[in-house]
Amino acid sequence: MASSAISHHSAIFSANKEVGVKSSLNSSSNIYKCRKSVLCKNLTVMAAAQLSRAPSTTGSVKHGMTMTEKILAKASDRAKLEPGENIWVNVDVLMTHDVCGPGTFGIFKREFGENAKVWDREKVVIIPEHYIFTKDERANRNVDILREFCIEQNIKYFYDIKDLSNFRANPDYKGVCHIALAQEGHCRPGEVLLGTDSHTCNAGAFGQFATGIGNTDAGFVLGTGKALLKVPPTLRFELDGEMPPYLLAKDLILHIIGEITVSGATYKSMEFVGSTVDSLNMEERMTLCNMVIEAGGKNGVVPPDETTFKYLEDKTTVKYEPLYSDANARFVADYKFDVSKLEPVVAKPHSPDNCALARECKDVKIDRVYIGSCTGGKTEDFMAAARVFLASGKKVKVPTFLVPATQKVWMDIYSLPVPGSGGKTCSQIFEEAGCDTPASPNCGACLGGPRDTYARMNEPMVCVSTTNRNFPGRMGHKEGQIYLASPYTAAASALAGFVTDPREFLG
């Protein structure tokens, strides 16, 4: 025991001996010897006081935080967070819709009382948009329940619909919740947005922590404005290179999901960076973040920049604080993609990670094409499809359904000229190509919906769709086969009648 203690003292002395010698170089030989003796004694005393500390310990290694960790730290009034911690966060926005709203309200009233009031009527956003354009009485009753609750609670942001026969007669009606949240200014950098829908992660495109929660959690948030969350670790995806003219953001996220699988990001944050991401507009960034849930992700985020701030200029007056990952932040893994070398892809039935190059599926005969939903029903998505139809000058060979995500997108389809078209709008190009007339903005067919939902698959068919899921029964019939694709690939497939690489029409 004694010898080991002596060895420990000696090791500490020898590690510091050089410092003691160098500090005495200008002294005389006698003074140096005296100081060396004193130094030896002092070090022996100091060493005895540090026996509980391992010789190799240098103190805690400081590291930064990722963007998601910073947002959650701010929302929980913490200076520092670690992945895996359970924390109470203050919620900035809670969204619910006609599918989950009634259940959420029931839990809220059961737990907080029939006469309870929500924690903040201006931070609750309620959007009917799933099962609304239907004669199904139960679906219609769900919207009635939303309306009754919003009147009772004086909810500021209730995007109501009363006349189901003509959506344009409803100025308050917006459409699909994820795109409406962005267009109405509820998506802001540095905030926490929770919603009773798994694709709430769409809002991460704004540098916001956004994720889906269940009715029970949402009922608790309604009453308290707080939620208990576990801090997720972060995966970083660096996308660099010039985007080829035949690729869209949908191709990028399908490539990523195909690479890491549907469980590759389970309860993790997916952060998207790189020159390619910087070049994407907000709608394309939303497409990236929308489908992180298809990889099992807790949330997705894109660092906010001038593109973000410009988009928000006329949409919100609420002050927000952009947050960014530290240079020395810790990531679970880094994935790098050279986008310039990627090709158009599709996700074959029945999983979003069952990916293949579109050109390798050219023998797959299809029955229909669906362009719409929160992933593929934005203005840029319809502009992309119109460019393919315009370039081909041909008519579609299979029924092609067009469902705008929101009322604003519907208006854009009829008013904005497509670049290079000589002033033609998307609607004019779609009509010339033989597509169905653009329908009422909603999410019904994407999710399946009641049998009378427009564009629902009521028979076993093969469909190329710009939606985000291709599980059995997702768009209706459980034997239907869904190929997930970008609007470019969907439009090209409509023209050919087979799954088709858009380069055949775009050059």
Image (tube, grey):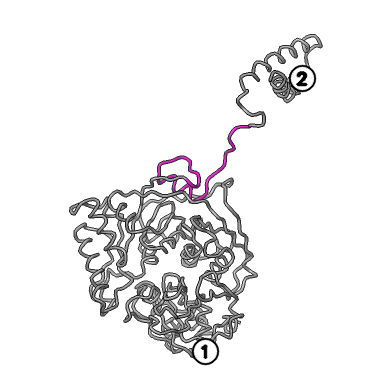
Residue 459: image location, x then y, percent? 40, 85
Specify the farthest residue to the front. 1
Relative to 138, residue 70 above or below: above
Q: Residue at (26%, 77%) from the top-left corner? A: 136
Residue 278 quadrant: bottom right
Q: Give the number of the disc on residue 221.
A: none
The residue wearing badge 2 is 21
Relative to 57, residue 355 above or below: below
Residue 493: image location, x then y, percent? 52, 84
On the rendered structure, is 490 left or right of 31?
A: left
Give the residue type at disc 1.
Answer: Gly
Q: Quadrant of the C terminus?
A: bottom right
Q: Secondary structure at mark 1?
A: loop
On the rendered structure, is 36 left or right of 387?
A: right
Q: Residues within 10 Å of mark 1 (few under 14, many from 20)?
A: few
Relative to 130, residue 37 above or below: above
Residue 77 drawn in magenta = yes
Q: Residue at (53%, 83%) from the top-left corner? A: 492
Residue 96 drawn in magenta = no
Q: Nearer the viewer, mark 2 or mark 1?
A: 2
The residue wearing badge 1 is 393
Give the residue type at disc 2.
Answer: Val
On the rendered structure, is 14 left or right of 370?
A: right
Task: Give the magenta part as a residue range.
Answer: 58-84
Residue 148: image location, x then y, percent? 20, 63
Q: Quadrant of the N terminus?
A: top right
387 vs 124, nearest the viewer: 124
Q: Residue at (67%, 28%) from the top-left corner? A: 55
**Measured Cα–Cα span from mark 2 to mark 1:** 86 Å
